[in-house]
Image (cartoon, helix red, strand yellow):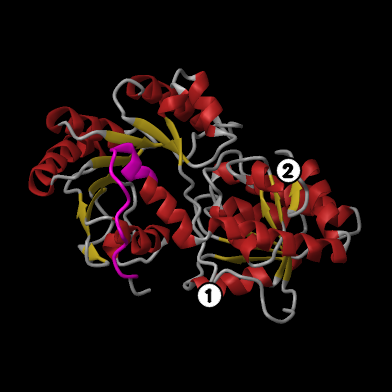
Amino acid sequence: MRLLMVSGDRQVVVGEKGPFHAMQREFSRWFERIDVLCPRPDRPAAIATIHGNVHFHPADCDRSGMVRWIERRGIELVKEHAPALIVSHDYGRFYNGRGSWRIARSTGVPYLSELHHVPGHPVCADWKERVEKLLARAYVGWAKERALAFRVVNHGEMPPLLERWGVPRAKIVVLPSLYIDLELFRPPEAPVAVEQDVIFVGRLVGNKGLFPIVDALARLDRAGTPAKALFVGKGPLAGELRARVERAGLAPRVRFVEWVDAPARLVELYRASRVCVCASTCEGGPRFTVEAMACGTPVVSTPVGVMKELLESGACGALAGFDGASLAAALARVLGDDARRRAMGAAAAERARGFEYAATLRGYAEGLHRLVGLPLPAPLPERPR
């Protein structure tokens, strides 16, 4: 089976080996050929093909021309390589889905709409997310008669939302997107010295709940249980985040790292943390919390993405509300008893085994084959890392 993917990922074509590059290493074993349409990168493209059979085609236009470019280039690729399915990663103003439908309309190749999450669901962080949620609802209403199906990545959050928006349950396919390399992300073989009590990893943007995390740390401070924290990431809220840490008097106990250049270093940071925190208002995964769990670090999180499913029992950490007081209370529960915290970490590592890289991506590939009525073939040889 051949596949045409319409993606928003621009990292690969400029030589960055992020999650999409890692995903394609295994995914490429299950398809004869994969072509990927992606936006124009912000610097000259350096990579055209990875893993031998995954071919990238960056746009030659800006956002205003994306729908037409996806249609034109996609039709060319369908004629040249005859993919059985178009997979569109849909978000924002839905250029990908709109362009993918045009390809499908012209060629007869069906398209699958992937919605990893909807901004503003379950909670709107700001007015922008309210607008984005309205756009998502309008797109779903338009696409529900045009797309072959909708792929979502969790069971508890997205299927009920799409059903409320009028999508038949039979057109909603749950194929998880969290794939973790458990050979790398795993608990330490010997005890590791603690460097920080709390770790956050991710983009410093509005939906990540950064300011409630600061509020929670300040509340712990006032309660006489100060916590050292590390924020790993960069983004438009970096300056305001640092300013809020300063105003709260937390600067001596809070560190910032913009970028971790190797996954192995990220593993070290997770292992050296007593708890990982996620305060997001909307997420598809999130990935970093499950990476931390795989390393034996319990998690405190708002009930977004898969986190409600993973933390509901309390065995692997704690669920919290979307405010600083609730986050502080959940962090205190996990940090207050170190023996219990270690037991949570062991349970978290065991729970994360369900997201093993190869098995998860095999399931994703099998789901795509099943959508077009084809059996999953024998895999190609394992790709080098």
> Dot 2: few (<14), some (14–19), or many (≥20) neighbours within 10 Å?
few
Q: Amino acid at mark 2?
A: Glu
- Is residue 25 something one can see in this rendering? yes
Q: Main secondary structure of the magenta part?
A: loop
Give the quarter of the image for residue 198.
Answer: bottom right
* Side (left or right) of 190 relative to 19: right
- Indicate the position of residue 8 as horizontal and vertical percent values: 33, 47
Number of numbered discs visible in the structure rendering: 2
Q: Earlier in the sequence, mark 1 or mark 2?
A: 1
Per the model, the C-alpha gap separating discs 1 and 2 is 29 Å
Q: Amino acid at mark 1?
A: Ala
Label 1 SS: helix
Question: Residue shown at 47%/25% (left/top)?
Answer: 169
- Indicate the position of residue 331 as horizontal and vertical percent values: 79, 53
Question: Residue shown at 86%/66% (left/top)?
Answer: 339
For the C terminus, the image quarter is: bottom left
* Above/below status of 15 relative to 6: below
Assess whether residue 381 is covered by the magenta stretch: yes
Front in this rendered view, residue 246 or 290 = 290
Disc 1 versus disc 2: nearer the observer: 2
The residue at which mark 1 appears reads as 264
The residue at which mark 2 appears reads as 312
Question: Residue shown at 8%/43% (left/top)?
Answer: 79
Label 2 SS: loop
Q: Which residues are magenta?
A: 367-382
Front in this rendered view, residue 330 or 378 = 378
